[in-house]
Every structure is written in structure tokens, then in C-alpha cells.
Image (spheres, rainbow, N blue to C red):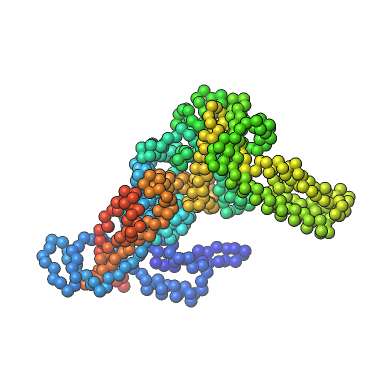
Amino acid sequence: MFLRHKTRRKDGKEHRTWSIVENRRVAGGRTVQRHVLYLGEINDTQRAAWCRTIEAFEEAGQQPRQVALFPEDRTAPGLDCEVVHVRLAGLRLRRPRQWGACWLACELWDQLRLDDFWTPRLPDSRKGTHWRNVLKTLVAYRLIDPGSEWRLHRQWFEQSAMADLLGEAFDLVAKDTLYRCLDKLLAHKADLFSCLQQRWQALFDARFDVLLYDLTSTYFECDPPEAGQRRFGHSRDRRSDCVQVVIALIVTPDGYPLAYEVMPGNTADKTTLRGFIQRIEAQYGKVGRSWLMDRGIPTEQALAEMRASETPMHYLVGTPRGRLSQLEQAFLSQPWAQARETVEVKLIEQDGELYILARSAPRRDKEQAMRRRRLKQLIKRLHELRSQKLTRDQLLIKLGAARKEAGQAAWRIIDLQLPGKDQAVTPETFCFRLNWPKLRAARRREGSYLLRSNMTGRDPAELWRFYLQLVEVEQAFKALKGDLEIRPIYHQTDARIEAHIFVAFMAYCLQVTLKQRLRSLAPGLTPRSVLETMAAMQMVNVELPTTDGRTIVLSRYTEPEADQAILLQQLKLSLPAQPPPRITAAEVPDSA
């Protein structure tokens, strides 16, 4: 290890920052550098102290051998192999690293036969880089302990057993290698979608005749760019201050992701459906499918095209509440049907379509509590403004802030009387009152939502239960943003941005595979809880010094505890054999 500095100028001043860097010798006689520790700006005295510390912990090189081991106080019989006497009193345990979750991630990778898919598409480089192992490491990292590629290079790989599981050295996660691997992925995205569909059909008998479609956004913590997909737009993450991209995703009701697309951050939801339907039909053929979507995605023109399609194409979509006003009288004469203990539904048919009105008691209570809280806060704020001495312009600014805080649903229930352009703000010129007809209409509609479908002849309760499956795509977004931490994104180019999302998508596919195995073999457990349980299994190096100055190194994963053993048995998984021992050569002093 050695100290290395970088010099940069900022605000007319030169800054010199220092880092500890380690040289790693790998196959082929090559050397790869690893950033061990960032020190920042240090003075000469601190630099000398760091150099002394590094020299004290410098390690000798290693070379694996196969030997017969005997305690130092026993004489070995005549053997064909090398005999090494070890000092048992000097036994040491070193380099504890996370093994169990890494091994499980590799198992899930093998169950999807992703090595078979990637080997011809990511051939080894002429320098011996195994690109599929680089990708496997990136995906396992995203699944287990997601973070940046820089953190993977500098910290996580050393603290995990991926090198042991893959038979690789540290050069696998050299910083530039990770980024170059990202550049190789996007050309194979469509082929991967088809491969995954076939594997899920073979493993779980998955069906793909019902598709759930939705969109989300993910943001960047960086300065806005001049070009590319990073754009300001409607942020589902409540980060309107950040540029973003939009991700459109299709999953099945069982949660199997079928395809996704990355779009500019200012893409409107209603402009995406037609193109996605065309891509799905081009890749998987024109067969009868049912599409489930939330309101705001399909336009009237898109729904008309789906109804007029030569190939049967059904849809069930959420509908804006504004249409409920148009259909309210028609619904009044229809009876309610019980879909669930706390949910009622009713149905009308109009122009070859079905409209399903659903009313949920828990949802009504929630919306009622939200409306009361916001309305109470708004009225309190309006009373405060009436008691303040304000100009008309100041009043309008504060009313705008109050409206944003209360939300449109509460604001529309209040009727305001504002002072004229040249009038002073007084209790007589500025007053307000509740609009009781609007309040009664809001109460009547709380807990209700409207669905729309061309699946005529179906029971309304059945269609309502069908629509509930849309929660699977919401769970997919929750997993991507929660467990897999797809946000925020730090990459700068569109290709790297899409590759980052592609790696997160593959990690989600591993998570879905584990989820499906748990559904049938260990219901009640979540993929995250299983990964956390398995992550407690560590790998350590057992080091035995020999009488001739060398060291025997046995890399061993810890035996599973009771909960881990039960989990492995329930999932029908078997642990691999322990790795073979290694011997390190004695340290050779440098020649003068």
C-alpha cells in the first residue's frame, strides 16, 4: 500500500487530497489498484504517521499449494506430498466477510440459468476479464446491499465472499471494469425479457395473458443537464427540485416482470401506452391479453383502438372521478353487490363498456379523516389571515401558500370573498364560508372510485377483485425503490443511466424468483427477511503458521444456525463443500 495524492484548483486555491491505495497482483502478472481509505487534505506530519502505519501492516504475497499438515510436535510418516508442520498455538481467524446472502444470490442466478444466457453475449476479454462474473457481482450487490459502483469497488467486495464464490480476484471490481461492464448490457435487454419469460414458465408455470402496466419516476442528485433523458417533471418521489427519468413497467398478477422502458423525465403518462402495446406485440406476438392500468394512463383514443383491435384486447382501468358526475344518476337505480365484507360494488353498461362503482368503508374513513384534517387547518389559517394587517398582494401570496398546503379537495369546499383591486383588506372585504352542497358531494363520494372495462358480461365483484391485482406493479416499484435502492442515480450519460436501471431490474428478477419459491415452500417469509437471515453466515480465513515461516489459510463459511438450517431445508437448498486450503509463501526480504 502507498499514499497517492490528487491536486485540484478551486476558488483560485490549490487543494491536495491524499488517499491510501493498494496494489493487488492478479492473474497474468498484472497489477490492479484498490482505493483503501480517503484521507483528505493532511499535513506532512500526518502523512509520515500514515506511512509508518502502512509499513507496519504490509502483507507478503500469496501462492496456493497442496500439502499434508501435522502438528509441530509430531513426526510425519513418509508421504508423496509435501509435509508441513503447523504451530497450533498460533492459530488466527482473519477477514470475516458476508457469505450466506452472496451464495443465495448466486443460487438464484443459477436457477434462472443466466450464465447460459450471458456467456455467449458477454465473452471473456483478451485480458481475461470474465464479464458475466462482473455482472453477477453488480446484480448480487444491488440485491443484497445496494449502493454506488464506487462503494462496491472500495468497500463491499472486500467485505463479501463474492471473490471466493466466483473464484475471482480483486481486479474483477476494478473501478473502470465495473463501468465498462455497464456499457455492454443494453444491447441484450429485449433478449433477456424473452429468456426470463421462458424460465418463469418452466419454473413456476407462469402465465402472461394478464398484464399490469404503470409508471414511476426516479430522481438524480446532480445539476440539471443540457440534453438527455434527465428532465424536470411530475415527481412521484416528491423531489420536484431534482431532474428525473420515468420508468414504465409491465408485470403479471403474480409479480413476474415482463418488460420495462426508460423515458425522459417530462414524459406524460398518457403518451406511453400505445408504444408499449406495440413493443409487447412485436416481441411476444399478438394474442388475447388483458391490460390493467391506473387512471391517467389510457386516453380515449387508446381505449378506442384497443376495442377496435382485430386481436381481442381487454382492459380494466381506473377512471377519473370527474366521470362519476356524468354517470351518477345512472348508478342511483342500480343495486349494490357485496364484493367483500367492507366493499360494495355496482355496475352499469354504456356504449359497449362497463362502469364499476366501488365503495370501500376503510378507504372512506381514511379520506374522511384526511379531508377533515386539511379543512380544519385551512379554516384556521384563513382566520389567522383575517386578523393580520396585510395588503391585497400580500394576502393573495399567503392564500396561494395556504391553497398548496390544504390541497385542491379541501380548497374547493371554501367560498372566498376577496377585496377588489383598490380595496383595503378588512374583515368586511375578505371573508369566507363553507360551500355546503360541495361538502355534501365530497362526503358522498369519499371511499368511492370508478373502474372502466370492455369485459362485458362479467360480475362487478369479480372485476373489482381483478383490478386489485394492480397492487403487484406497485409492489414492484416499492421493491425497486426500497429494497434495491434504485434512487438516487448518480450516472451522467443516458447509456449508464439505463444500464443502472437494467442491473436493478435483474436484481428484482432474482428477488421475484426467491419470492415465488417462498410462496410455495415457506409462505409468510419475505425475500428481504430471507436474505437478512442468510447474511448472518460469514466466511473467515483460519490461518495456521508453520514451522518454516509459511501460513496455511483455510477459508471456511460458518455452520448454519438453527433458523438458517430450517430455512435451507424448507427451500430445498444444499450448501456447497468448503473451499480447499491454501498455503502462503514465507515473506522474502527486499534486496538492497
Residue lying at the far top of the rendered structure: 310
Query: What x and y, as percent, mark residue 584?
Result: 27, 65
Q: Residue at x 62, y 48 (%)?
A: 365
* Residue at 48% in and 65% down: 38
For the C terminus, the quadrant is bottom left
Residue at (58, 53) in percent of width and height? 222
Question: What is the number of callouts on the image?
Answer: 0
The quadrant where residue 450 appears: top right
Residue 266 percent across, percent down from the top left: 61, 43
Picture layout, residue 496 above or below residue 205: below
The foreground one among 376 and 296 is 376
Q: What is the quadrant of the N terminus in the image?
A: bottom left
**Residue 535, percent from left and from top:** 39, 58
Work out whether residue 554 or residue 445 is closer to the camera in this orientation and state it: 445
Q: Nearer the viewer, residue 481 or 453?
A: 453
Residue depicted at x 37% and y 56%? 534
- On the image, which quarter does residue 93 sit in? bottom left
Asked if one can make out residue 466 in the rendered structure from this viewpoint, the answer is yes
Residue 229 can be seen, yes or no: no
Q: Pick the residue in front: 382 or 465.
A: 465
Q: Is residue 94 above or below residue 325?
A: below
Q: Does 212 sit left or right of 407 as displayed?
A: left
Rendered view: 326 above or below 588: above
Residue 325 rendering spot, x and y as whole percentages: 69, 35
Left/right of residue 190 with respect to residue 400 in the rendered view: left
